[in-house]
Image: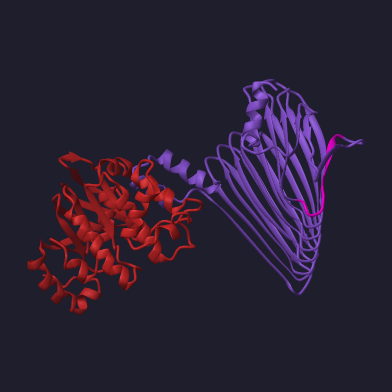
Chain colours: A red, B purple
Amino acid sequence: MLELRDVSFEVLQEEKPKRILNGINLKLDDNKFSVITGPNGGGKSTLAKIIAGIEKPTTGKIYFNGEDITDWGITERAKAGISFAFQHPVRFKGITVRDLVQLAAGHIEQDSELCTYLAEVGLCAKDYINRDVDGSLSGGELKRIEIATILAKKNTTLAVFDEPEAGIDLWSFHKLIGVFEKMHQRKNLGILIISHQERILNIADELILVSNGQIKKQGARQDVLPELLDIVDSCKFFQSEDGVK
Amino acid sequence: MNDNQKNLLDKIADLSSATLEAYNIRANGQSVERASTANIQITSKEDVSGIDITIKPGTKNETVHIPVIIDAAGLEERVYNDFFVGDGADVLIVAGCGIHNDGSESSRHDGVHTFHVGKKARVRYVEKHYGEGSGQGKRHMNPDTIIEIDDGGYMEMETTQIKGVDSTKRITKAKLHDDAALIIKEKLFTHGDQSAETSFEVDLDGNDCRTNVVSRSVAKDTSKQLFLAKIHGNNKCYGHSECDAILMDQADISAIPEIRAHHLEANLVHEAAIGKIAGEQLMKLMTLGLSEAEAEKQIINGFLK
């Protein structure tokens, strides 16, 4: 289980502190499928990065399976079971799809096994396995490879995806939903997805609305979703004002 | 051959798996083993130190190995090797230099390789440089490569210097005739206080000739690198040069690409990028469970692969 206690995060903007996250309290249970949604610029990606260890909170504590991991680095958290799929997948020079999936898997895998991860995200392995993870791949292809690295990382007990649907075509999107549903069936695996897609919201157990650096709503999907859809219709939502009283 | 020499040979030339065809092994300034074939003749030069390698026109799928190894400290040599590749031949040439220096005096190998690539001939030229040894003596390698490619000829040159060479000054000059092509791929890694200077000059003289000069390098510690690439478009031609370098620690890299077009149909492009390892690349690999040092190693190995 992951727990964030009173987590805040500030950056310096024109030499003045700007608060991106403000007093976040959040518990994510194992086996639960949670989706964070909310307007752009509301702090969602920062929250995901704080969980993965890419950003350090200015104040507050983070616990993973009861252990204080606030000061842990990215590697320690990855080894402890936290996996993170980047919103904008990273490009490399000279690192192939095989290399990357292999590194994620952590030990030498047969090509046939590596291929199953690629097939799950809708990529024909033989066309991709020897290609470099670089700009020669489209944004959608990179995104799917990014998701495949999370599938390959076996020790995952909390998988965090930052807008996995971005750049993925409609057909693949359908398949992507299937990937998440299949992951959700795995035991002892918590899933946290940042998404704006109603179809992803629809398969979540729990929805969390983050806006202006705060959690504005959190609860079971069936309770939160109808209200969320009402809010989204308001103009204030698109002006980065959540419209939630 | 002693163990040091055998080890050097392993590092720069994969002779074990190859069925030995034409070859010349030079150790400590002397030619110690040599074989010619019906199509490839290797003969000693009479006026200077070095060999002539003459490949008959139409020779296909043959390989020439000409490794140079030095394990005597203080040995300095300048060697001239000339390759005459006959029209329509298609061959692989593997050269390399390995220096093992346990002494306090410098060892130096200056190799001047001249390639005469015939009409419609194809050459793949692979060159590896490697240095090792516990002594204070420096290891220097200065290869000059002079290339002339006749009409429709093609040459691919892959050079690699990964470890142990204290200083290198590499000069490559090429002249291309009609429809000729030259592809150069250079990989360079320097560390400690090593220095490497690499200079390419390609004259695109022929109609529809082309070249692509690509250098990937990593400079670590306080090492220094200088990359110079000059491409001259003297006819309807295409030329591209690219220097892509990763900078680490207190290292220093300069890239000076130059393109000059002297013909309306010359199409020339240069690219150069120097920078440290992208933080997001490290982060991605760390989210897969690698330490920062492991991630760095993977990124560099991939970059220089």
Residue located at (75% from left, 55% from top): B201
Residue located at (16% from left, 42% from top): A65
Residue located at (41% from left, 47% from top): B282
Q: Is residue B241 visible?
A: yes
Given residues A243 and B157, the one toward you in this image is B157
Q: Position of residue A115 (x, y in %)?
A: 37, 54
Q: Quadrant of residue B26?
A: top right
| Magenta stretch encompasses residue B51 | yes
Asked if residue A64 is positioned above or below residue B200 in the image, the reply reads: above
Given residues A104 and A224, the one toward you in this image is A104
Q: Position of residue B161 (x, y in %)?
A: 63, 40
User: Residue reaching furthest front?
Assistant: B38
Q: Position of residue B89 (x, y in %)?
A: 76, 54
Q: Quadrant of residue A108?
A: top left
User: Residue reaching furthest left?
Assistant: A223
Q: Is residue A54 visible?
A: no
Q: Is residue A11 left or right of residue B141?
A: left
Asked if residue B46 is positioned above or below residue A117 in the image, the reply reads: above
Q: Quadrant of residue B135?
A: top right
The magenta stretch spans which residues?
B49-59
- The quadrant of the rendering that contains the C terminus of chain A is bottom left
Q: Position of residue B65 (x, y in %)?
A: 72, 39
Q: How many marks?
A: 0
Q: Is residue B228 left or right of residue A177?
A: right
Q: Is residue B16 left or right of residue A178?
A: right
| Magenta stretch encompasses residue A74 | no
Given residues A64 and B209, the one toward you in this image is B209
